[in-house]
Image: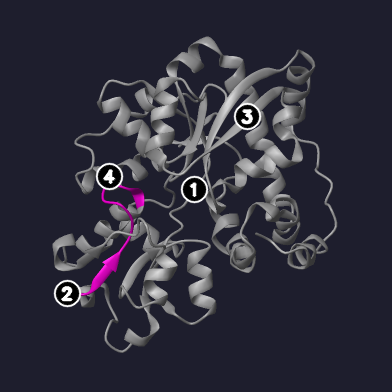
């Protein structure tokens, strides 16, 4: 839990910045005046859902005409299953769940983009710097990402295979019950796929160095084949897009306002708003994450890039998690978010 002193340290940073008028206002205000629509939204815990906590805490959902109940899930699979079962209307999670579901005949859709870049790094323990200078040097080493079949695992396989290794060339340790931070800090693994806030705590403490940083444009292009990859999105079910389209429209309004807020305000101001949701020990790391990859990977608006959609999906195709591509026309509902190349 946060201490009052530590939270107030962040709460005192920066004054509230007034939002400039945007197209969002002309869309959302009439919707709000026409009565509210009740929706249930799914999100995972932690920094990856910061763009869900902001509109909840600042009232952007309410202003868009949504009576939104945010339900937290411990795993993406459970959230996807809740979306399929109709227990929630929208899910803030990886587009992977659309690919999985569509290939099994379940009509989930991406309705809004949430990220433009892969924001995880391949890190190695600092005490191994003299021994591991390239990905190929990881052969025989203890390596961790996440559960097999997840996004972080798929990224790790891409990194290994494009450097002449396979997942069988490393001793794989799943970071399920033990965090990536703990596995590296305790020396239980030699290398791992890491993202905020663990990444920044480890770097600040000198525990690891970055062997590959996907935010480097050349690295991103080499391993993911494009300048952008849509790694997180808002998902829904066809019963919502067909029966409650205005709910989708209002969600997009809140999403666009959230992204405008994130780009117009300092990381310190954002922490002032949502810092109470995070563990006290992670606040510095989360602030660093906002200053670096988060602001770079968060899009300007909810519009969906066909290139980024395919780049994300191809990671799972190349690693065998899915057997064929789900065409953009089937996996995406962009009536309100809009489409980019």
Residue under label 4? 316
Residue under label 2? 140
Residue sitting at 34 percent across and 59 percent down? 175
Q: Position of residue 289 (x, y in %)?
A: 58, 62
- What secondary structure is found at the residue carrying circle 3? strand
Q: Name the image quarter holding residue 254.
A: top right
Q: Whole-Å distance between the Cαs marked 1 and 4?
A: 17 Å
* Span highlighted in magenta in the image: 140-151
**Residue in the foreground of this view, choosing between 146 and 33:** 146
Q: Whole-Å distance between the Cαs marked 3 and 2?
A: 47 Å
How crowded pointer 4 is (Cα within 10 Å; few <14, some 14-19, many 20+) is rated as many
- Which residue is farthest bottom? 130
Label drawn at residue 29: none
Q: Which quadrant, please, contains the N terminus?
A: bottom right
Q: Position of residue 222 (x, y in %)?
A: 32, 60
Relative to 203, is 249 on the left or the right?
A: right
Q: Earlier in the sequence, mark 1 or mark 2?
A: 1
Q: Are marks 1 and 4 in contact (CB under 8 Å)?
A: no
- What secondary structure is found at the residue carrying circle 4? helix
Q: Main secondary structure of the magenta part?
A: loop
């Amino acid at each position: 839990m946060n201490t009052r002193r530590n939270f107030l340290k962040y709460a005192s940073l920066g004054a509230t910045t007034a939002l400039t008028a945007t197209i969002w206002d002309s869309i959302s205000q009439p919707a709000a005046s026409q009565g509210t629509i009740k929706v249930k939204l799914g999100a995972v815990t932690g920094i990856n859902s910061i763009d869900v906590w902001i509109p909840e805490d600042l009232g952007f959902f309410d202003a868009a005409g949504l009576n939104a109940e945010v339900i937290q899930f411990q795993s993406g699979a459970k959230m996807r299953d809740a979306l399929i079962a109709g227990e929630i209307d929208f899910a803030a999670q990886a587009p992977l769940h659309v690919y999985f579901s569509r290939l099994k005949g379940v009509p989930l859709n991406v309705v809004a983009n949430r990220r433009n870049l892969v924001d995880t790094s391949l890190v190695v323990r600092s005490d191994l710097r003299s021994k591991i200078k390239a990905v190929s040097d990881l052969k025989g080493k203890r390596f961790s990402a996440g559960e097999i079949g997840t996004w972080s695992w798929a990224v790790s396989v891409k990194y290994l295979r494009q450097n002449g290794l396979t997942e069988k060339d490393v001793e794989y340790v799943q970071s399920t019950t033990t965090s990536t931070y703990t596995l590296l800090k305790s020396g239980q693994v030699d290398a791992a796929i890491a993202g905020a806030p663990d990444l920044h705590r480890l770097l600040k403490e000198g525990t690891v160095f970055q062997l590959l940083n996907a935010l480097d444009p050349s690295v991103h292009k080499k391993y993911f084949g494009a300048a952008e990859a849509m790694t997180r999105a808002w998902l829904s079910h066809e019963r919502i897009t067909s029966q409650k389209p205005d709910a989708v429209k209002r969600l997009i309004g809140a999403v666009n306002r959230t992204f405008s807020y994130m780009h117009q305000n300092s990381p310190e101001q954002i922490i002032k708003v949502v810092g109470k949701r995070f563990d006290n020990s992670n606040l510095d790391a989360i602030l660093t994450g906002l200053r670096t990859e988060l602001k770079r990977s968060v899009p300007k608006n909810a519009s969906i890039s066909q290139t980024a959609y395919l780049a994300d999906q191809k990671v799972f195709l190349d690693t065998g998690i899915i057997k064929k591509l789900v065409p953009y026309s089937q996996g995406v509902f962009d009536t309100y978010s809009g489409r980019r190349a």
